[in-house]
Image: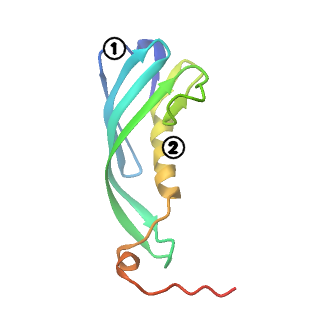
Amino acid sequence: MRIAFDKLGATPRPVTLKRDGVQMKGTLRRSDTHRIDLDGRLSGEMTLTCDRCGETYRRTLDEPLQLCVTDRVAEANEDLDIIEFFDGVVDLTYILESEINALEGDYHLCSACLETDETLNIEL
């Protein structure tokens, strides 16, 4: 889903997008000439792999999502949660895919590995 940057105003615009079992629901609102605020939630389920035992498991998501979208180069002293689009379009599919990739890239432990106090031995 792509929305023209110029079509977004100060009135919050509701958006909903779903991909791979994860839903992004929220609002887009212009807060400055070159800045759009995305205030929403990520919800749903995703399959993850435990980084300790290698087993796959399902994780339920219900997390806030607050990002700034801009159509210019972000200054170093600005927010770190900022996404730049230079083609005049806010690409919500790209934002959702990026959030899913970031969640998948985190360190994950399944419930069995979270509950164990067994020391992990690594042979070198």
The reply, left or right, for residue 101 in relation to residue 39 is right
The three-letter code of the residue at mark 2 reads Ser
The tag on residue 105 is none
Mark 1 residue type: Ala
Determine whether 98 is above or below 117 in the image.
Answer: above
Q: Residues within 10 Å of mark 1 (few under 14, many from 20)?
A: few
Q: Is residue 61 above or below residue 34?
A: below
Question: In the depicted view, which residue is nearer to us: 45 or 31?
Answer: 31
Task: Report the mark closest to the observer, 2 or 1.
Answer: 1
Residue nearest the observer in this picture, 120 or 14 = 120
Q: Position of residue 17 (x, y in %)?
A: 36, 37
Q: Which residue is mark 1?
A: 10
Residue occupying the point 34% across, 79% down: 115
| Residue at 60 percent of width and 29 percent of height | 76
Q: Quadrant of residue 37?
A: top left
Identify the residue at horizontal 61%, vertical 85% (top origin): 122
Please tell me which of labels 2 and 1 falls first in the chain.
Answer: 1
The residue that appears at 38% across and 30% down in the rendered structure is 38
Image location (x, y in percent) of residue 63: 32, 48
Residue annotated with mark 2: 98
- Considering the image in quadrants, where does the C terminus appear? bottom right
Which corner quadrant holds the N terminus?
Answer: top left
In this rendering, would 93 be left or right of 122? Answer: left
Q: Residue furthest front?
A: 77
2 and 1 marks in contact (CB < 8 Å):
no
Secondary element at image label 1: loop
Above or below, comparing residue 104 to residue 81 in the picture: below
How far across and how far down the image is residue 69, in percent?
48, 27
Instruction: Say few, some or many: other residues with alpha carbon within 10 Å of mark 2 (under 14 / 14 to 19 / 20 or more).
Output: few
Q: Residue 43's x, y, as percent?
A: 31, 48
Residue 88 location, quadrant: top right
